[in-house]
Amino acid sequence: MIAYLNGVVAQKELDRVVIDVQGVGYGVRVTTNDVASLVQGAPAKLFIYEHIREDTHDLYGFQEVTGKQLFEQLLSVKNVGPKVALAVMDLGSEATIRRAIANGDVKQLQTAKGVGKRAAEQMVVELRDKVGLAASAGAEDIVSRGGVDARDEAVQALLALGYDEVDAQSALAHVPQDLPTEQRVTAALKGRQ
């Protein structure tokens, strides 16, 4: 397993760089921000995620280890592969992406290439508590609106995903209350397909 590459930027393309490590060129897929900030001919260190399948062996690189960690969190979401995860990483800084997930900003996540509403909702549901940020005051205001059981975390999650109060309650109506919150939200989302 390759943990990182430390070499010289030999070539730059739209979504890829070639890192020369002692005469061996490694093609590494990176975000457009990283392509812009890496200088051809200059030294660079990239933290690597290897994606190995029967027909591919792709390397994904990040200038910061926290970028690689966020990428791996995105990959943990059901039906999110490396290309979609990299597209999400292209939305902006790590802080911007983490904030979008923590605040349930499905619309912002949907602006990434290949990310539909379902995938964006799934990212929020699965990663909201794992990205290291608390929900914003705006998200809390949505949750605390009248008529909503503020103690029901599943309702809160659906409201943060853009559901209105009536839709959130009806989506959860046939989901057992004794399930963990994440499973209740996932079941409610599946029921809306």
Image: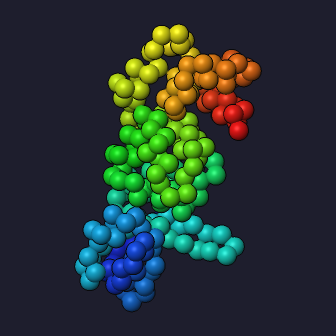
Residue drawn at x 46%, y 79% as measured from the top left: 27
Q: Position of residue 135 (x, y in %)?
A: 40, 29
Q: Nearer the viewer, residue 26 or 36?
A: 36
Q: Nearer the viewer, residue 183 or 190?
A: 190
Q: Please identify the quarter of the rendering in which residue 32 is found.
A: bottom left
Residue drawn at x 47%, y 42% as measured from the top left: 107
Q: Position of residue 22 (x, y in %)?
A: 37, 86
Could you tell whether 73 is left or right of 33 in the image? right
Q: Position of residue 108 (x, y in %)?
A: 43, 45
In the image, is residue 86 above or below residue 162? below
Q: Please identify the quarter of the rendering in which residue 84 is found.
A: bottom right
In the image, is residue 141 above or below residue 1? above
**Furthest-bottom residue in this view:** 23
Residue drawn at x 30%, y 69% as measured from the top left: 36
Q: Nearer the viewer, residue 159 or 94?
A: 159
Q: Position of residue 123 (x, y in %)?
A: 54, 43
